[in-house]
Image: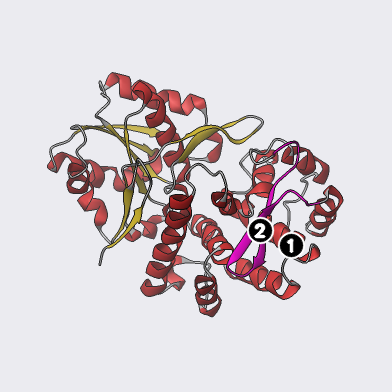
Amino acid sequence: MQSVISVDLPNESYDIAIAPDSLEQLGSLMAKLNVGKKALVVSNRELFRYYGKSAIASLQEAGFEVASCTLPAGERYKSLASVQKIYSAAFENLLERSSTLVALGGGVIGDMTGFAAATWLRGINFVQVPTTLLAMVDASIGGKTGVNHPQGKNLIGAFYQPKLVLIDPKVLSTLPVREFRAGMAEVIKYGVIWDAELFVQMEQAASLDQLDHLDDGLLQEILIRSCQAKATVVSKDEKESGLRAILNYGHTIAHAVESLTGYRLVNHGEAVAIGMVAAGQLAAYLELWDKAAAQRQDALIRKAALPTKLPAGVNIEAIIEALQSDKKVQAGKVRFVLPTQIGAATVTDQVPQDLIRQVLRQMES
């Protein structure tokens, strides 16, 4: 059964299509987008071995002239050097402004491919085919594209919307358990900041730590409700001038932890889980929500087998310093997304540095 969620924007509206075995429909769906006949599939090498042939065969069957570009996997390769490889492949295959870059992979591949699409020939078409849970529920939707700078995560980028997001839940069968759990961090985020019913559904589930432990109905509910949450927020605030900032819940401290550990020790979802624990504690101390709600959140994070403590050896003062280079800093003040109840959140820059330090100390391993 296919579910279609619309992301309604003033200039670049598009659909999120969710259906088992939909990877085989990639070509026919792209053919309906009124794009040119040249496509470049960008993926990482391991993922391409699993799904590259299916994606290319579907595109060729629909009449597309298809080339591919494979990159190393991992956050540390989310760089301008990797984007340069996409540019080179685009040049070698004579991509035109009507051509399409197809991102087949997780959030790293999607972010880099989107940035390449935004900047090659001043903008060509872009389609997201996310293959990780994290990318399906978060990274592939909303048009945030970019790469990391040595001094911080996602400091180089652009808002650039895809023409289509195609989600095939069956590709999750090859996703490593650790990456599945990373995606659950973003799902929990939606429950905390937006969708209290989704939060309760996850509380009632027997387990959240492995794909095999979820029944198909809950997985479909997770995908649909998470995508709907993000689509709704992005439709209201495309360029993050207000409401969309709540989607950064847990990400302020997460980005600092990722950067300080060289993008090697914890993955993005694990860092977000740590950041949500910290933000939940900050909100409790500031009496924005009660301690019982914070405990419910942390219990859900543990249920997904995600970390609730800082990685060993991470210097708290280094985190405090790294926060100052976060994209969300305004007038020198760090802005935090903090929950006010299960299903709602606010953005504030009124978080004392000493309180941040206190909470982080409580989270030391």
Query: Mark 1 highlights which residue?
Result: 283
Q: Provide residue 180's location: percent of width, then percent of height.
A: 49, 59
Q: How crowded is mark 2: few (under 14 residues within 10 Å), some or many (20 or more)?
A: many
**Which quadrant would the C terminus be assigned to in this image?**
bottom right
Q: What residue span does the magenta drawing correspond to?
A: 330-351
Image location of residue 24, percent across then percent down: 21, 52
Q: Which of 259 and 120 is in front in this view?
A: 120
Q: Contact (CB < 8 A) between labels 2 and 1?
A: no
Whether residue 127 is situated above or below residue 176 in the rendered picture: above
Which residue is painted at 78% across and 46% down in the image? Answer: 313
Q: Which amino acid does label 1 sit on?
A: Ala
Which residue shows up at 31% across the image and 42% down it?
163
268 sits to left or right of 8: right
Classify 10 Å Cα crowding around label 1: few (below 14), some (14-19), many (20 and above).
Answer: many
Q: Residue at x 67, y 39 (%)?
A: 326
Q: Which-is-in-front pick, marks 2 and 1?
A: 1
Left or right of 24 on screen, residue 282: right
Q: How many marks?
A: 2
- Say whether residue 133 is visible: no
Q: Which amino acid type is shown beneath numbered disc 2?
A: Met
Quadrant, the N terminus: bottom left
Question: Which structural element holds mark 1?
Answer: helix
Q: Is residue 236 shown above or below 79?
A: below
Task: State the SS at label 2.
Answer: helix
Does 244 lie within the magenta span? no
- Look at mark 2 in the image and give the residue it sits on: 276
